Image (cartoon, helix red, strand yellow):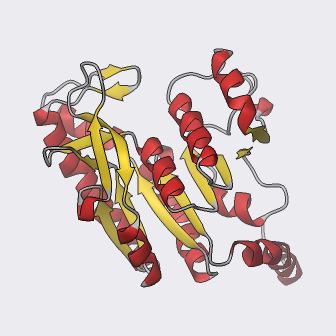
Amino acid sequence: MVLSALEKAKILVEALPYIRSFYGKIVVIKYGGHAMLNCELKRAVLTDVVLMKFVGMHPVLVHGGGPDISRMLKRLGKESVFIDGRRVTDEETMEVVEMVLGRLNKEIAACINQLGGKAVGLCGKDANLLLAEKEEGDLGLVGRVRAVNPELLLSVIAQGYIPVVAPIGLGPQGEGLNVNADTVAGRVAAALQAEKLILLTDVSGIMSDPGDENSVISTLHLQEIDRLLASGRISGGMIPKLECCREALAAGVKRAHILDGRVPHSILLEIFTDEGIGTMVVP
């Protein structure tokens, strides 16, 4: 579809009140799923992030890397084992996790820089950014965030850079811990008192009927999350996403959004248009 100059102008006018409203505000984006694997979508997501910075917002990117980690483990002849959706992480697996996430982290930062932004790649070990402790059970070096120290992120933001954070936590003995990226994004958003938390995923949003793509819940209230989780209609990787939305909003984040990262420019469509897409979680 080719837009006329007038249609393009109308789009900009529609975006203006949103640009004004979110100017100077922090938006934490969890980047993962198919949008990390498809080159065209990857460029679209990171272009959105650069545009947000240029119109005065402060995006913070937290990325995953599960598929890449699984592929590398397979190449090394090591099977990926999961318990309740979490990767069992022994010392050898943790070495692979740190290697793969470190590579992805620098690739994402480099792509943002190539698109005209200024990005800095970080992980939770940098300046005690993400202090973590081991999860209970037989998961090995899997951690949960105990505390976020936002000073480094705030300093990077103040200097005009876009932080890109790999979800590796710093354990009590200085060891690296593998932490769920959704959880990290939620905790970072809470520590920064972000205006928005955006989670990119591979579905259209939270659906009232998991088998019906047209049943996306446009707006979900915080008090409805526990009821929805208890209903059994939410499963797999969507559970930690909803949990981190709940925790982030309870800690002061204004809005959380679960978006389909397979849709090009889904971030811009959600933030800068009247209709929006996906599911917005509100207090």
> How many numbered markers are drawn?
0
Q: Nearer the viewer, residue 169 or 7?
A: 169
Q: Nearer the viewer, residue 85 or 111?
A: 85
105 horizontally vs 40: left or right: left
* Residue drawn at (80%, 63%) of the image: 273
The x and y percentages for residue 113 are 39, 78
Q: Nearer the viewer, residue 120 or 255?
A: 255
Residue 199 can be seen, yes or no = yes
| Quadrant, the N terminus | bottom right
* Residue drawn at (65%, 56%) of the image: 266
Task: Classify 72 as above or below 86.
Answer: below
Residue 35 can be seen, yes or no = no
Task: Classify 137 as above or below 128.
Answer: above
* Residue drawn at (70%, 72%) of the image: 22
The x and y percentages for residue 161 are 43, 79
| Quadrant, the C terminus | top right
